[in-house]
């Protein structure tokens, strides 16, 4: 049984499973907690279930961004490449106009 309170932005380890996760949302009215595991999976727990888990508060992992941030960065790189191509085409059109 845990006496660790859930705090948004804090990281915890389930001592039974070894899984690390961050509390990402609390709904006091519904008495639920939303957690996100290091691998990006999200789970919702009710407050009673939280206090039944064998939890310990931990420091955020060194690479706490997880795999989803890598996807977002790759998508941003693709977007930037598309932007560069768009500008290159526009530049060519402007150059063509200057030659006229």
Image: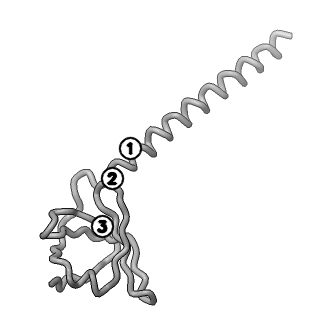
Mark 2 to mark 3 CA distance (whole Å): 11 Å
Q: Secondary structure at mark 1?
A: helix
Is 43 drawn above or below residue 46 in the view shown? above
Q: Which mark is residue 12?
A: none
Q: Position of residue 58 (x, y in %)?
A: 18, 68
Residue tagged 2: 65
Q: Nearer the viewer, residue 89 or 6?
A: 6
Circle 3 packing at 10 Å, graded few (<14), some (14-19), many (20+), is many
Kind of element beneath mark 2: loop
Residue in view at x 30 percent, y 67 percent:
22
Q: Residue at label 3?
A: 22
Tag count in the figure?
A: 3
Tag 1 and tag 2, C-beta contact below 8 Å: yes
The structure residue drawn at horizontal position 39% and vertical position 50%, both measured from the top left corner, is 68
Secondary structure of the residue carrying tag 3 is strand
Earlier-in-chain disc, 3 versus 1? 3
Left or right side of 36 for 53: left
Question: x%, y% of residue 7?
Answer: 31, 78
Q: Is residue 85 above or below residue 36?
A: above
Q: Earlier in the sequence, mark 2 or mark 3?
A: 3
Q: CA distance from mark 3 to mark 1?
A: 18 Å
Q: Which residue is mark 1?
A: 70
Label 2 neighbour load within 10 Å: few <14, some 14-19, many 20+:
few
Quadrant of res 56: bottom left
């Amino acid at each position: 049984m845990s006496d660790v309170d859930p705090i948004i932005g804090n990281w915890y380890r389930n001592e039974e499973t070894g899984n690390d996760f961050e509390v990402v949302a609390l709904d006091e009215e519904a008495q639920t907690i939303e957690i996100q595991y290091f691998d990006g999976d999200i789970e919702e727990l009710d407050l009673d279930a939280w206090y039944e888990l064998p939890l310990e508060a931990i420091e955020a992992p060194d690479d706490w961004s997880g795999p989803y941030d890598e996807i977002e960065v790759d998508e941003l790189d693709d977007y930037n490449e598309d932007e560069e191509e768009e500008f290159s085409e526009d530049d060519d059109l402007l150059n063509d106009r200057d030659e006229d």
